[in-house]
């Protein structure tokens, strides 16, 4: 469901594993009485692995979605970086501006090229 969390999925996986282990113990007793029950056991085992696989896939997808949401949230607001603006009126300030911009913004590996361009436009 859309409201599922990783913790909820983990709880269901744990419950599924516990229940299946309990079934396996009981099934040995059933086989001692009815050897024909082997087919039922195979079907149940297939269903167990099917459900376990689906839960693990759901968990992976949910984890990926959470990472994307965190990345989007952190990337949507750029940190406030203080670099003096360069107006172009005084060319003697160009070299110090570019050195500071390069050191603080351009060499920052956590910023994308688009973010760097945004900062450059902000400081001009």
Image: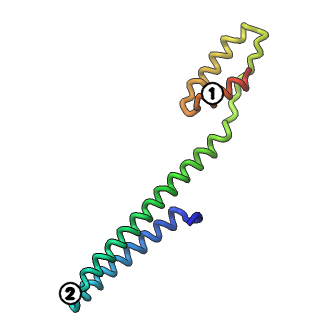
> How many numbered discs sit on the rendered protein?
2
Q: Nearer the viewer, mark 1 or mark 2?
A: 2
Q: Residue at x 22, y 86 (%)?
A: 36
Quadrant in which residue 117 is drawn:
top right
Q: What residue sits 28% from the left and 82% below the top?
A: 25
Percent from the top left, x then y, of residue 63? 50, 55
User: Label 2 neighbourhood size at 10 Å, few (<14), some (14-19), many (20+)?
Assistant: few
Residue placed most toward the observer, 78 or 113: 113
In percent of width and height, residue 119 lies at: 68, 27
Looking at the image, which residue is at 43% across and 64% down? 54
Question: Badge 1 local density, few (<14 within 10 Å), some, or many (20+)?
Answer: some
Where is the C terminus found, in terms of image quarters?
A: top right
The vertical placement of 89 against 34, above or below, is above
Could you say which quadrant of the image residue 44 lies in?
Answer: bottom left
Distance between the alpha carbons at the discs numbered 1 and 2:
71 Å
Q: Quadrant of the N terminus?
A: bottom right
Q: Which residue is mark 1?
A: 116
Is the C-beta separation of discs 1 and 2 under 8 Å? no
Q: Residue furthest bottom?
A: 33
Quadrant of the rendered image containing residue 121: top right
| Lateral position of residue 19 relative to residue 109, left or right | left
Q: Indicate the position of residue 55 as horizontal and vertical percent values.
A: 44, 65
Please give left or right for residue 58 compared with residue 81 in the image. left
Which circle marks residue 35 in the picture? 2
């Amino acid at each position: 469901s859309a409201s599922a969390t990783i913790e909820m999925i983990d709880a269901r996986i744990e419950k599924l594993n516990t229940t299946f282990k309990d079934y396996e113990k009981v099934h040995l007793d059933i086989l001692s009485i009815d050897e024909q029950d082997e087919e039922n056991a195979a079907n149940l085992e297939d269903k167990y692995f099917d459900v376990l696989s689906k839960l693990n896939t759901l968990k992976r997808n949910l984890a990926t979605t959470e990472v994307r949401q965190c990345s989007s949230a952190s990337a949507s607001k750029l940190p406030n970086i203080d670099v003096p603006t360069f107006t172009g009126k005084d060319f003697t300030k160009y070299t110090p501006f570019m050195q500071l911009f390069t050191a603080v913004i351009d060499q920052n590996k956590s910023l994308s090229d688009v973010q760097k361009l945004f900062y450059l436009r902000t400081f001009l």
